[in-house]
Amino acid sequence: MSEELVLDSLRRRMRAMFSLYEEATATMNAAQVNHREREGVLPMAFSLFHFINLADTASAALMGGPPLWDASWESRIQPGIADHGKHRTVAEMQHQQIGDFPAFIEYMKAVFARIETWLAKLAPPELGRVMVQRPFPPQLASTFSARVAGDQGITVLDGIECWIYQHGLRHMGEIELARSFVGLQGMTS
């Protein structure tokens, strides 16, 4: 399979996944997003903030620049916990809330636009560039991307696939289930 074909597929799949997030957030309100089903169950606010904030961080690492998230976004969005929660427990993150949902949607769309602009300009040979060489640091060694990585380490293609695409689909599944808790339908069949 050619690098051009892989990159074209990535661009289309990323746009499709982002459209699911855009459609989901357009059909929900802050009360639904912040709904806590019960103790020990993460609200949609967690899945949304966690994925978008990590996609921002991961894409910044892939692009070689800073993430969009800063004190200004934090003050506008007002997350209950100003942390994506990757290294926190469910007990800690079950209290995640999004204070200003329209501001969050604006941040989400900015992250998506930045990723899509970068992918549109990405040269196919860049997909094979190694981002993180083996041996992996302890914090990375137990991740899905470490399992996917080849002998050399985690490539740009691995990072796009694992850190953004597969991660985003995982959390969309959680969002689809959580939508049923607040009387909304799923996004796909």
Image (spheres, grey):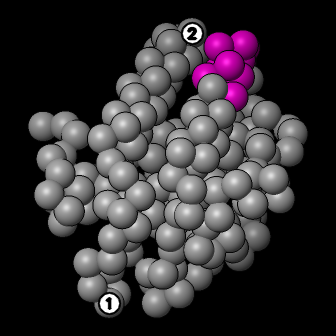
Amino acid type, label 2: Glu
Q: Pick whichever, 9 or 98, lies toward us.
A: 98
Query: What residue is disc 2 on?
Result: 4
Give the vertical position of 43 relative to 131 (above or below): below
Write down the quadrant of residue 142 in the picture. bottom right
Residue 130 in the figure: left or right of residue 149: right
Residue 124 is inside the magenta segment = yes
* Contact between labelled residues 1 and 2, with CB atoms less than 8 Å apart: no
The stretch of residues the image draws in magenta is 114-125
Residue at position x 38%, y 75% in the image: 42
Give the vertical position of 168 relative to 45 (above or below): above
Where residue 123 appears, as percent x and y from the top left, is 72, 14
Q: Earlier along the polypeptide chain: callout 2 or callout 1? A: 2
Circle 2 SS class: helix
Residue at position x 50%, y 70% in the image: 97
Where residue 170 appears, as percent x and y from the top left, is 37, 53
Amino acid type, label 1: Glu
Write down the quadrant of residue 121 in the picture. top right
Give the vertical position of 157 relative to 67 (above or below): above
Q: Residues within 10 Å of mark 1 (few under 14, many from 20)?
A: few
Answer yes or no: is residue 16 visible.
yes
Outermost right residue: 65
Q: CA distance from mark 2 to mark 1?
A: 47 Å
Residue 176 in the figure: left or right of residue 6: left
Where residue 22 appears, as percent x and y from the top left, is 42, 34
Give the vertical position of 158 relative to 101 (above or below): above
Answer yes or no: is residue 150 visible.
no
Q: Quadrant of the C terminus?
A: top left
The dot on residue 39 is 1
Q: Pick whichever, 22 or 131, lies toward us.
A: 22
Residue mark closest to the camera, 2 vs 1:
1
Residue at position x 79%, y 46% in the image: 67
